[in-house]
Image: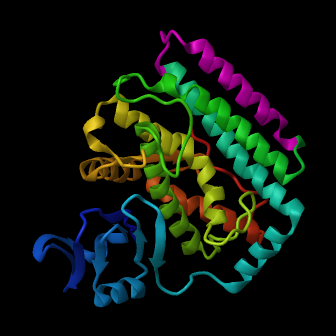
Amino acid sequence: MKRHLNTLYVTTQGSYLHKERETIAVKVNGRHKAKLPIHNIESIVCFGNVTCSPFLLGHCSENNVSVSFLTEYGRFLGRISGPVNGNVLLRREQYRWADDYSKSCEVSRFILSGKIINSRNVLRRFLRDNKSYNESESVSNAIKVIQDKYKSLEKVSTLDELRGFEGLVANSYFSVFNHMILQNKTDFTFNSRNRRPPLDRINALLSFIYVLIMHDIRSGIETVGLDPSVGFLHRDRPGRYGLALDLMEEFRSFFADRLVLSLVNLKIINSSHFRVTDSGAVLLNEDGKKIVLSAYQEKKNEEIYHPYIEEKCKYGRLFHIQAMLLARWIRGDIAGYPPFIWK
């Protein structure tokens, strides 16, 4: 059966979604704006003042189409979905692993190995694609620091040390992120990672795309029957999806960060697509969100080779595949978790 990767993102404030036969109809201020075949939609994400009819929500729940509600700025509010997939035995084993400190460290090492290698590979790809870049020494030094941390990863025995490793790798990686911005340097510059709220345009893009990836990873986790709230590196905290944050780590650099760089360096997005709030937060405006959402959806439908399953798949399938591989390890079907390594 073909699995559709189409997510309906609704950002227009005042939108109302309802079901008309086999379509999702979108109204704004009482006027029809769009109709989409409901069987082509995998999930719906609503930003801000967007409402859905009870009949549509019921249909989505019955047909495993998740509906997520976020604030206009991208903060997660809630999600409506059908019955929990999977079996209770898998989740019970997940909870046992999360309560086992040494097992949590083992899972976290696998997860961080993927993040570290992918961060290094993104920087390596940048140098390979820009051989004449005059700041290559700074990027090369960051690659060396990240590589040294990867070599030392197996020696780390506590979660606090692992989190410290992750922080050092992230600092080295983001210390040269501004070097990879090659166009629109007057409008787009990056000094450091900031969020809640983002204070510049690059951070606004990063935060927004991270939210989109988080939504898709959480859906993948729930599809295979795991609990997205119970993580290993990211421990339990009310309202936090620890396992989704865990699995997200390997996707940040090669998926989200490279998408941001493409949007900027290809001049797909510019300063007119942002707004600044009274508090100083820099956010995407309506047009900016549409551009990013379109680019994100296109990226999800691109194909890439998966080295572990040894076949091509769409980027959007990676979230489900990686959740499935983690579930297989927890069930005892494979010997460890193979993070997705981007090359």
Q: In the drawing, does residue 146 fall left or right of residue 125?
A: right
Q: Kindly give the residue lying farthest to the left in the view shown.
A: 31
Quadrant where the C terminus is found in the figure: top right
Quadrant in which the N terminus appears:
bottom left
Residue 288 belongs to magenta span: no
* Numbered-mark total: 0
Magenta span: predominant SS is: helix
The image shows residue 227 at horizontal and vertical percentages of: 64, 74
- What residue is rendered at 53% in x and 20% in y? 127
Left or right: where 221 falls relative to 159: left
**Left or right: 275, with 250 as reference point:** left
Q: Residue sitting at 53 percent across and 27 percent down?
A: 125
The residue range painted magenta reads: 129-154
Answer yes or no: is residue 268 visible.
no
**Where residue 215 sits in the image (x, y, percent)?**
48, 63
Can you say whether 126 is above or below 220 in the image?
A: above
Q: Is residue 137 magenta?
A: yes
Which residue is drawn at the image coordinates 37% and 66% (left, top)? 4
Q: Look at 82% across and 40% down and name the residue there.
A: 153
